[in-house]
Image (spheres, grey):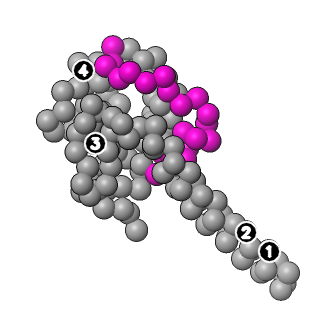
Amino acid sequence: MTTMATVAALLAVSAATAHAQDFEQGKVAFRKCALCHSIGPDAQNKVGPQLNGLDGRKAGTVPEFPYSDAQKNSGITWDEANFKRYIKDPKAAIPGTKKVFAGIKDKQEAGNLWAYLSRFNADGSEKQ
């Protein structure tokens, strides 16, 4: 039994480390986004909307950002699956979007980016 408990503890630590690595790698991946988007306590709209509170937010709803009609009428509520589909090829996911970005094709990188973005509340604070 002691061996099983040790293995279970190691797996738990390994899973926690992998999650932390995903977040950190997502932070690195966000550098591709930072020219147009911001996130965190001081986030403001730039060329693209600020991304605080993205998880669960309806597309095209950040106040004072001039979204395309395509984005506003997309019917998307951001979650991991919708984000990954969108970030892979924004123009294919929402035809008519103003977003000029080739996309992130690597599934791991897109997942890491979601791990980072989804950690921020609407006020820019990090979820605990």
Picture coordinates of residue 10, whole percent (x, y): 74, 73
- Which residue type carries mark 1? Val
Asked whether residue 78 is drawn in magenta, I would say: no
Q: Judge the density around disc 2: few (<14), some (14-19), many (≥20) Cα neighbours within 10 Å.
A: few
Q: Residues within 10 Å of mark 1 (few under 14, many from 20)?
A: few
The mark closer to the camera, 3 or 4, is 3
Residue at image location 33% in from the left, 19% down from the top: 97
**Nearest-to-viewer mark from 4 and 2:** 4
C-alpha distance separating marks 4 and 1: 52 Å
Magenta stretch?
96-116
**Which amino acid type is marked by label 3?**
Gln
Look at the numbered disc 2 and give the secondary structure of its residue: helix
Q: Label 3 near label 1: C-beta < 8 Å?
A: no
Disc 4 versus disc 2: distance between alpha carbons? Answer: 45 Å
Taking the image as shown, residue 42 lies to the left or right of residue 82, namely: left
> Disc 3 or 4, which lies upstream in sequence?
3
Instruction: Sort mark 3 into few (<14), some (14-19) or many (20+) by Cα contacts within 10 Å.
Output: many
Q: Which residue is mark 2?
A: 11
- The residue singled out by tag 1 in the image is 7
In the drawing, what numbered circle is on residue 84?
none
